[in-house]
Image (tube, grey):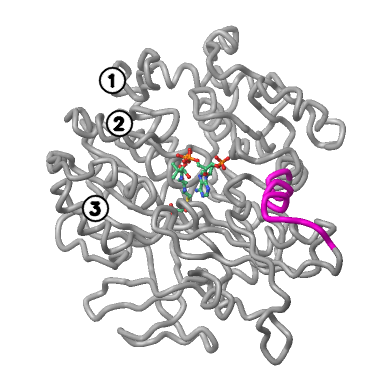
């Protein structure tokens, strides 16, 4: 189990630095073990039992990490939430998961304080100042862990919400076994070492920043230096400092670093591992990085429901435009999207995945879980791709209606649902238009009601009240009609062709 490996690090190298947040004093593995243990006892003192959901909507901070590891350790289910979610979204996640406890930023007390009365399962809302000492909050909860490590690898450790093409967001249940399988595979494939130093600039409420990056470092007994947010100038300066061996980012971050460098050349070849994921890495950035930074980015492919699936190799060819080879323990295949029969190399079909890292199912949604898998247990990723004859995989678009912006998934139906609440909107379609910095940009195409008066700014502001800012349209276009197929369904590909200029 991923916790067992961590427990071993706690024992074997108690004085080694595990996590350092900006200018705060570093946290050693021994210190981490102690605070996580106290935090577990603290959660138990608040009435949390195995299987209970513990939510946290906090900025990137140490208490978030303590809560995550402590919840896992006492067999509770951790629910990490993006601080960008407005109250309406927060309420949905808490209601759907039936969270008993929410830890939130004290700055949001006025905004979300009243939420508890609307959520019968939510027994307590704990507002904290992330900068205050967490250690003093849990100081009196010392003593042996009152609960054993969860023994069952099928037990859910986290709920990670992902949206759906046809429904409201669904909570993907990530089990202890999933986390172990993932981290063991990445450890082997990427050669994590105890003397690695990770520069961590990702958010920690997603699989990328939390599992791939942070668990990766902790599993190896390495050090993670955590930046509260991504800033290209700061990150470039740190990468050049030669203190770090590992950095992970989404293409938007790499684009900004590349642009930050301008005409200058920097030699980052001393770094052991620089990865890119959460969205496709554009070819020009792959080559631009080689020229500017003298390194080849390692592109890998994953998703919330699985963690990591495919990766270019640490040693060997990192192929431009390819997401690489299946990780150890991962089975991948390309199938005909209609018949779901495997296709030969070179042919484009849906990418399907199997392995111990694949999630257990959506929280409380057995029918959605059943839809996600083939009868013989392959996960339908909704991504189209092809396998090259030598085993490398290349992605070729999506079967599902999904926009990826800055490494974050936005499901058009969710935005369309929000838009339809606006009194001036008669019909709408949300599409992703290509964008150099963000990969894609969310664009709303609207047929207004007759005589309705509205404009782009008002529509955008309306969406931001209901949805996190990254999901809100960046552009709004007004049209008289949509291109539709024979069944009357909006043809988004035609809209994209016509409107993404
Ligand atoms: C921020 N904004 C975004 C955005 N992030 N808009 C669209 N898409 C995004 N991803 C908005 C802000 O709200 C702000 O709006 C405006 O853009 C400019 O903000 P910024 O300060 O320039 O953005 P910044 O905070 O620097 O964020 C950019 C970023 C961030 C790239 C650093 O988006 C990020 O950390 N992305 C990584 C996401 C990630 O971890 N994905 C992994 C998912 S797991 P305004 O108008 O209010 O000013 C997964 C599986 C896998 O996918 O395989 O990894």
Q: Of the residues under marks 3 and 1, which one precedes in the sequence?
A: 1
Residue at 68% across / 53% down in the picture?
363
The secondary element bearing badge 1 is classed as loop
- Which residue is tagged 1? 16
Q: Which residues are magenta?
A: 452-465
Q: Looking at the image, which residue sits at the far bottom? A: 486
The secondary element bearing badge 3 is classed as loop
Distance Cα–Cα, label 2 vs label 1? 8 Å
Q: Nearer the viewer, residue 495 or 325?
A: 495
- Which residue is tagged 3? 297
Q: Position of residue 453 (x, y in %)?
A: 81, 58
Q: Nearer the viewer, residue 298 or 406?
A: 406
Q: Within 8 Å of ligand 1, the CB of disc 3?
A: no
Distance Cα–Cα, label 3 vs label 1? 29 Å
Is the residue under label 3 in contact with that under label 2 (CB below 8 Å)? no
Q: Position of residue 455 (x, y in %)?
A: 72, 56
Is 35 left, or right, of 51 in this rendering? left
Label 1 packing within 10 angstroms: few (<14), some (14-19), many (20+): many
Label 2 packing within 10 angstroms: few (<14), some (14-19), many (20+): many
Query: Which secondary structure is most common in the magenta stretch?
Result: helix
Is the residue under label 1 in contact with that under label 2 (CB below 8 Å)? yes
Q: Position of residue 203 (x, y in %)?
A: 47, 38
**Quarter of the figure with the N terminus:** top left
Q: Is residue 201 magenta?
A: no
- Which residue is tagged 2? 221
């Amino acid at each position: 189990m991923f916790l067992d490996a961590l427990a071993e690090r706690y024992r074997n190298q108690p004085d080694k630095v595990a996590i350092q947040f900006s200018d705060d004093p570093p946290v050693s593995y021994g210190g981490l073990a102690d605070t996580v243990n106290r935090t577990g006892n603290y959660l138990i003192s608040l009435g949390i039992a195995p299987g209970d959901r513990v939510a946290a909507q906090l900025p990137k901070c140490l208490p978030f990490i303590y809560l995550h590891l402590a919840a896992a350790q006492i067999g509770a289910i951790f629910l990490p939430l993006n601080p960008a979610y407005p109250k309406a979204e927060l309420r949905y996640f808490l209601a759907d998961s039936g969270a008993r406890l929410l830890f939130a930023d004290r700055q949001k007390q006025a905004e979300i304080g009243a939420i508890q009365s609307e959520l019968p399962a939510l027994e307590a809302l704990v507002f904290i100042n992330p900068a205050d000492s967490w250690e003093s909050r849990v100081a009196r909860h010392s003593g042996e862990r009152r609960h054993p490590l969860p023994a069952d690898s099928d037990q859910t450790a986290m709920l990670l919400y992902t949206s759906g093409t046809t429904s409201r967001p669904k909570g993907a249940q990530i089990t202890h076994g999933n986390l172990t399988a993932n981290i063991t595979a990445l450890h082997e494939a990427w050669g994590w070492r105890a003397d690695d130093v990770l520069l961590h600039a990702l958010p920690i409420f997603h699989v990328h920043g939390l599992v791939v990056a942070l668990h990766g470092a902790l599993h190896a007994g390495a050090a993670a230096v955590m930046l509260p947010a991504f800033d290209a100038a700061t990150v470039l300066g740190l990468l050049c400092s030669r203190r770090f061996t590992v950095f992970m980012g989404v293409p938007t971050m790499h684009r900004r670093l590349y642009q930050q460098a301008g005409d200058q050349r920097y030699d980052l070849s001393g770094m052991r591992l620089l990865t890119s994921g959460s969205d496709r890495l554009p070819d020009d950035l792959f080559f631009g990085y080689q020229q500017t930074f003298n390194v080849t980015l390692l592109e890998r492919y994953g998703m919330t429901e699985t963690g990591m699936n495919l990766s270019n190799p640490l040693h060997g060819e990192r192929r431009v435009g390819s997401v690489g080879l299946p990780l150890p323990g991962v089975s991948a295949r390309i199938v005909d999207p209609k018949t779901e029969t495997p296709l030969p190399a070179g042919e484009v079909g849906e990418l399907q995945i199997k392995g111990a890292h694949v999630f257990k199912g959506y929280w409380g949604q057995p029918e959605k879980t059943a839809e996600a898998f083939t009868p013989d247990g392959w996960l339908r990723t909704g991504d189209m791709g092809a396998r090259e004859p030598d085993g490398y995989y290349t992605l070729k678009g999506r079967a599902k209606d999904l926009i990826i912006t800055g490494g974050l998934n936005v499901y058009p139906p969710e935005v369309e649902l929000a838009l339809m609440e606006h009194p001036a909107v008669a019909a709408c379609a949300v599409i992703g238009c290509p964008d150099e910095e963000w990969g894609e940009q969310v664009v709303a195409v609207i047929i207004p009601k007759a005589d309705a008066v509205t404009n782009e700014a008002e529509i955008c502001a309306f969406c931001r009240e209901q949805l996190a800012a990254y999901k809100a349209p960046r552009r709004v276009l007004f049209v008289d009609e949509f291109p539709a197929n024979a069944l009357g369904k909006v043809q988004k590909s035609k809209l994209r062709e016509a409107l993404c200029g």
